[in-house]
Amino acid sequence: MFFKKKQTERVLPRHIAIIMDGNGRWAKKRSLPRSAGHVAGAKTFKDIARYCNKIGLEYLTVYAFSTENWKRPKDEVEGIMRLLRDYLIDAENFKDENIKVKFLGNLEVLDEDIKALIKKNEEGSKNATGLNLNIAINYGGKDEITRAVRDIVKEGIKSEDITEEVISQHLYTKGMPDPDFIIRPSGEYRLSNYLIWQSAYAEYWFSDILWPDFKPRHLEQAIDEFNHRNRRFGGV
Ligand code: IPE
Ligand code: IPE
Ligand code: MG
């Protein structure tokens, strides 16, 4: 007896998180400076964000700079900050695209002009109804949880009142659904301190593609695979 497999609609994850990795290796392969890899990676980021908005994704959270990335040579860090600045200045264009931008991480230590631009962008896009685009800058999952604990203590919340929900509401991602799909290109199989609390039940997709080479079709491949995952959440 044969049963015809029922054709079901493809579902989109609600929240995709991407670790935008492999810029340096992409540049090295071409005998270019690492900074050229970051320039190419920034372009990929814009293309992928636009694509996610187009297909109607609710949340995209990208890892742009980690709390550990300060260990890199000064000129590389400055180059990345310059790209961030350019992006923020350019993001006026994003307004027409109806994308709501938010920055996750310890932004305090960033340069004053960058902080001002971030504020302007968040304010300016707050009424957008399309993609929620979160950009993680100076973000570290352990740092985020440490800050949450400090805030909870400062607010005087009683220990018996501290629930998972209370902790979630003290993270940078408060009010957002947890990522259900985490994508990491570049052939590394780790989280590198990314969304460690929020990704407790995420699905993962790894690939050898270097981030500057990542195209919408790769995202489509990943989403197709997401559709074949059997998510049980501890049940049967
Ligand atoms: C990711 O690419 C960008 C940042 C971490 C800012 P990398 O710069 O880590 O690229 P690889 O891993 O050296 O190839
Ligand atoms: C993770 O990539 C951080 C970002 C992509 C922003 P890294 O290249 O810094 O991670 P590791 O060092 O390989 O773990
Ligand atoms: Mg890397």
Image (cartoon, helix red, strand yellow):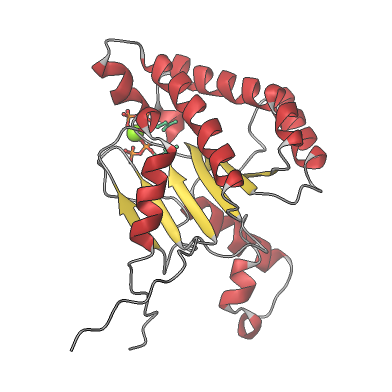
The foreground one among 161 and 29 is: 29
Q: Is residue 112 above or below residue 183?
A: above
Q: Quadrant of residue 8?
A: bottom left
Q: Position of residue 82 (x, y in %)?
A: 58, 18
Q: Is residue 192 visible?
A: no
The foreground one among 181 and 81 is: 181
Number of marks in the image?
0
Quarter the N terminus occupies: bottom left
Q: Quadrant of residue 102?
A: top right
Q: Position of residue 92 (x, y in %)?
A: 75, 28
Image point (76%, 35%), residue name: 95
Image point (37%, 36%), residue name: 21
227 displayed left or right of 147: left
The foreground one among 39 and 67 is: 39
Image point (54%, 40%), residue name: 51
Q: Is residue 132 visible?
A: yes
Report ligand 2 position as a quadrant.
Answer: top left
Q: Position of residue 140 (x, y in %)?
A: 49, 47
Image point (27%, 13%), residue name: 30
Quarter the C terminus occupies: bottom left
34 displayed left or right of 173: left
151 displayed left or right of 50: right
Farthest residue to the left: give it.
1
Q: Quadrant of residue 181?
A: bottom left
Q: Is residue 217 above or below residue 171?
A: above
Q: Position of residue 50 (x, y in %)?
A: 58, 38
